[in-house]
Image (cartoon, rainbow, N blue to C red):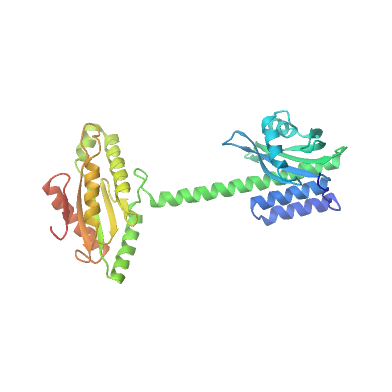
Amino acid sequence: MPDRASPDSSPDAALASAIAIVARGRTPEEDLAMLLAQAAGAIGGDLGSVFLWDAERGALALAASVGFPEGADTELEAAVAGNPEHPIARTAHGQTAILGAETPASDGTSVVSATWPLRIAHDGVEEPIGALAISRAGTWIVGESEASLLAAFADLIAITVDRARLTAMASERGEWEERVAHTDALTGLANARTLSRILELEVARAGRGGSDLSVALFDIDGITDTNAAAGPAAGDDMLREVAAVLAESVRLVDTVARWGGDEFLLVAPGSAGLTVARRVLDAVAGLPSIAGRSVSVSAGVARFPVDGTTPADLIAAAEAALRSARAAGPGTIASASAA
């Protein structure tokens, strides 16, 4: 059994140190480890552990530990998970403190533990999140002062865990909002706003480097008739299927986006735009029918600097080429230069 941590000179000093740990807000892992060490030292324990509910596993998981020899904390986690009568499990399940319970240690001896429930509250509703446990070897009568300190440390640890969860949720929401701002909700491709900016950057890059740049505009043939005959859901299915083909057919250096209602725009660095567009048309032609209708797209391709030197000029040239392709029939591709 490791040497017992030295308690702070007074409960007030211990709590002041713990509050300072929470206030500084390092990483959640560091804060938990420091609070746990502070709690064990203040109460006079040898070992400390924090168990939290793991939603994915549906079980208690060890979130932090202090004072355990190598491998002993893992054994404790297994013991808690496999025995609902373990004091830590009982406290987490029943949300009731257990003071002075004796449990066997990994070295064949036994320890006396004091466990306290961890809970957080939002809008007046309390949520149990786990348990705090402090243990020591030999005889230990947990008095009122130790219990009060344990409760205070449990609250500070719960605050730390809650803050970490809120921070993670805020980060995830920020990432989600960032994706929404740049993504078309129906197809999962980039949206027109995002591609407009990319096209500006690629045109500027091609202009500086004297390189080629291709822009291809795709239109789903007959989607208006599909919407009228089979309903908007069938049209949405077509959009999603074509979008999936586009995402799989373009190169890593290319960017494709939903440009309009039933149109997609491809920005392809270099001179391979016509080749990539042909690959897309062939792949779309291989799709199964939707609502009894075959799926095909027409495409118009423009090149920088032959067909335009600004984003607006290139898109206008691609639109003109697309009109030529439509006039020639479904599943046709046309080049702005040829048009």
Q: Nearer the viewer, residue 87 or 263?
A: 87
Q: Quadrant of residue 240?
A: top left
Q: Nearer the viewer, residue 265 or 51?
A: 51
> Which residue appears at 77% of the width and 54% of the height?
17
Q: In this view, which residue lies farthest toward the front?
A: 107
Please state the horizontal and vertical placement of residue 310, each as a whole percent of the image: 26, 65
Please state the horizontal and vertical placement of residue 160, each as a whole percent of the image: 67, 48
Please state the horizontal and vertical placement of residue 266, each as a whole percent of the image: 28, 54
Left/right of residue 118 with respect to residue 311 in the rendered view: right
Please state the horizontal and vertical placement of residue 281, each as a whole percent of the image: 22, 46
> Which residue appears at 76% of the width and 49% of the height?
37
Q: Nearer the viewer, residue 331 or 80?
A: 80
Left/right of residue 212 with respect to residue 60 in the rendered view: left
Q: What is the quadrant of the N terminus in the image?
A: top right
Image: 137 above or below 15? above
Image: 45 above or below 229? below
How many numbered discs? 0
Q: What is the quadrant of the C terminus in the image?
A: bottom left
Left/right of residue 267 with respect to residue 182 in the rendered view: left
